[in-house]
Amino acid sequence: MAIDLPFIWAGIIAFAVLAYVMLDGFDLGIGILFPSYPARAHRDLMMNSVAPIWDGNETWLVLGGGGLMAAFPLAYAIVMPALYVPLIVMLLALVFRGVAFEFRWKAETDVSRRLWDSSFAWGSIVAAFAQGIALGALVQGIPVKGRAYAGGWWDWLTPFSLLTGLALVAGYALLGATWLILKTDGEVQSKAIRLARLTGLATVLFIGAVSIWTPFLEPLYMARWFDFPQILYTAPVPLLVAASAYALLRGLNEGRELLPFLAAQSLFLLSYIGLGISFYPFIVPPSLSIWAAAAPPESQGFLLVGTMILVPLILAYTGYAYWVFRGKTGIFYR
């Protein structure tokens, strides 16, 4: 039986992107929530909660982008021209926020520290918004003619992509708030609970709006969600979203610490599954499938050997870092 390498590689890239969103999402959410915590001690505590793990989380973004270029070069060649602007803005924002993360600890005056704090917050907000816009532009479809991008320079900027951009900012803020509930206590945790209620409501509303809009973008999406018998397989997804939203609310009302974080992560996981249901097997919807965009089998097979070694190593050191720095976060200065 032949091995379906394009399918395997599509799964690897999908896993890498999901891991980035779920792990780096709360990291970006910390920055998005920074303006809500004006006190220096609170901001120091927030930064310390992600300091040991924030740069490692972005490893998954590198794996996803590098895997797309190597395993699906045609898709990479089409997606990049279509999304140059939001992707470049995202990368610049991530770099800017990384610089701010390091330099705020070395600031010698309150003015310079506030400058770096603002840079960290805006870098996080812009990066999250750009990621959401890129996602929305991909979901709404990228025009392809032959083997090249056939759209315009501004095709990525639409009401739908702006909606998904705002949705991702709200979702990351929810992840950040639930992370603070898990990792802090006292005033920081109390405010995080209030923020989790607000961002949780916003996230659920955005999920609903995007879910209602998406089927009208392409006939394929409409058929996947509403035609019989497909609806029998897709119906559990919105039901599980409702269950996760209830678990989030219940966890916040009962003062639970882990449950809100897991519920928020579940909302992201289910939303990701919903996107996969909408346009699988297309890697560039609505016209380019994973098999049409795949690199030669020899290339994918060679890359798969290295990936099978690399991914377990990444999982191991990521898990070890989270284990070592488990529990509540204290304040320390570098």
Image (tube, rainbow, N blue to C red):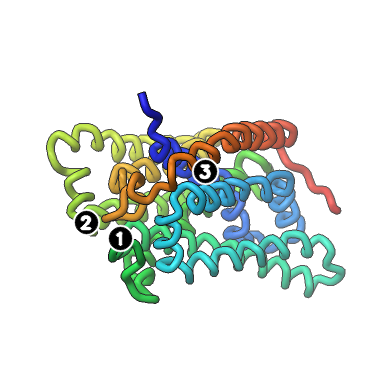
Q: Quadrant of residue 164?
A: bottom left
Quick one: which residue is furthest to the top in this view? 1
Q: Residue 105 has which mark? A: none
197 left or right of 233 in image:
right
Seen at 29% across and 48% down, the residue is 279
User: Cα distance, mark 3 to mark 2?
Assistant: 26 Å
What residue sits right under mark 3 in the picture?
Answer: 16
Q: Are marks 2 and 1 in contact (CB under 8 Å)?
A: yes
Q: Residue 141 has which mark? A: 1
In the image, residue 147 sits, relative to residue 276, either above or below, namely below
Q: Are marks 3 and 1 in contact (CB under 8 Å)?
A: no
150 left or right of 75 in image:
left
Q: Nearer the viewer, residue 233 or 236?
A: 233
Give x and y (percent) for residue 74: 41, 56
Give x and y (percent) for residue 64: 52, 48
First in sequence, mark 3 or 1: give its number.
Answer: 3
Q: Tell me the SS state at disc 1.
A: loop
Q: Nearer the viewer, residue 51 or 64?
A: 64
Neighbours of disc 3 within 10 Å: few (<14), some (14-19), many (20+): many
Seen at 54% across and 38% down, the residue is 302
User: Cα distance, mark 3 to mark 1?
Assistant: 22 Å
In the image, residue 97 sits, relative to residue 326, either above or below, namely below
Q: Amino acid at mark 3?
A: Ala
What residue sits right under mark 2 in the picture?
Answer: 218
